[in-house]
Image (spheres, rainbow, N blue to C red):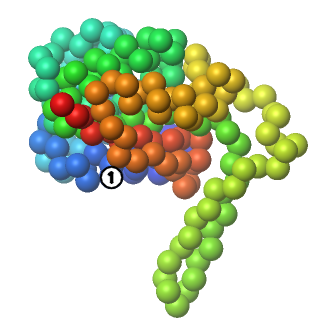
Amino acid sequence: MTKQRWLSLWHQLDEVFSLNPSSILEIGPWKGVFKTIAVHFGVAVETLDINPDFNPDHVASVKALPFEDNCFDCVCAFQMLEHLPYEHSLEAFSEMVRVAKDHVVISLPDAKPMWTYSLHIPIVGRQKIVHLPAPLRWRHKKHKLDGHHWEINKKGFSLNKIIEDFTRQNVKMMKTYRVNEFSYHRFFVFEKIG
């Protein structure tokens, strides 16, 4: 658990809590840190994973969720969908939307090299964070996929393609952004429509 991952976890909690859900389904809980913290704040979280070694509440495939339609206020998956082939990720996201009542929150790796700059203005008390594309010589470095089948901004997976494909699933995108402290993680917040 690096400092960057802790900061990404803060964004996970912040995004989900800002939606005021009374019930949450987290897909791919890994070590269960999100649920552990959320429960301390009085939020009901159930977890699902295909691997029983992670001790999820439900052992099942994300492509066939064992729940009724609209049964969780918010469904989330953080740094998980890229571990599936892209077509399977879309099937999984469709299932997430099906069981979500209101929102779906995900984060995905964004491979486009960015440099983060910040400026703190003492009198104003604000910190401005800006992401700028890395210089050309940095852009062509090979990035290890670490078990990922795909990543945003890898060949064939532009950000526009990801947004277009995911918003075909009966949702509208409320926002997307890269985590200031860890620009490799990109968040998406979707609202269910219809």
Residue beneath the point at 57% across and 83% down:
121
Q: Which residue is identified by label 1?
A: 14
Left or right of 80: which side holds 93? Answer: left
Q: How many marks?
A: 1
Q: Nearer the viewer, residue 178 or 56?
A: 178
Q: Is residue 2 above or below residue 170?
A: below
Residue beneath the point at 32% across and 19% down:
94
> Residue type at mark 1?
Asp
Residue beneath the point at 36% across and 16% down:
92
> Residue 96: percent from the left, percent from the top?
28, 23
Q: Quadrant of residue 64?
A: top left
Within 10 Å of disc 1 (Cα), the crowding (few <14, some 14-19, many 20+) is few
Q: Is residue 146 above or below residue 20?
A: above
Asked if one can make out residue 135 in the rendered structure from this viewpoint, the answer is: yes
> Residue 100: percent from the left, percent from the top?
20, 29
Dot 1: element: helix
Kindly give the residue lying farthest to the bottom in the view shown: 123
Q: Is residue 13 above or below residue 81?
A: below
> Residue 141: percent from the left, percent from the top?
81, 33
Residue beneath the point at 54% across and 28% down:
161
Q: Quadrant of residue 73?
A: top left
Q: Is residue 154 above or below residue 122?
A: above
- Quarter in which the C terminus is drawn: top left
> Residue 75: percent from the left, percent from the top?
26, 31
Q: Quadrant of residue 116?
A: bottom right
Q: Nearer the viewer, residue 41 or 115?
A: 115
Kindly give the residue lying farthest to the right in the view shown: 137
Asked if one can make out residue 55 in the rendered structure from this viewpoint, the answer is: no
Q: Nearer the viewer, residue 194 or 157?
A: 194
Left or right of 179: which side holds 140? Answer: right
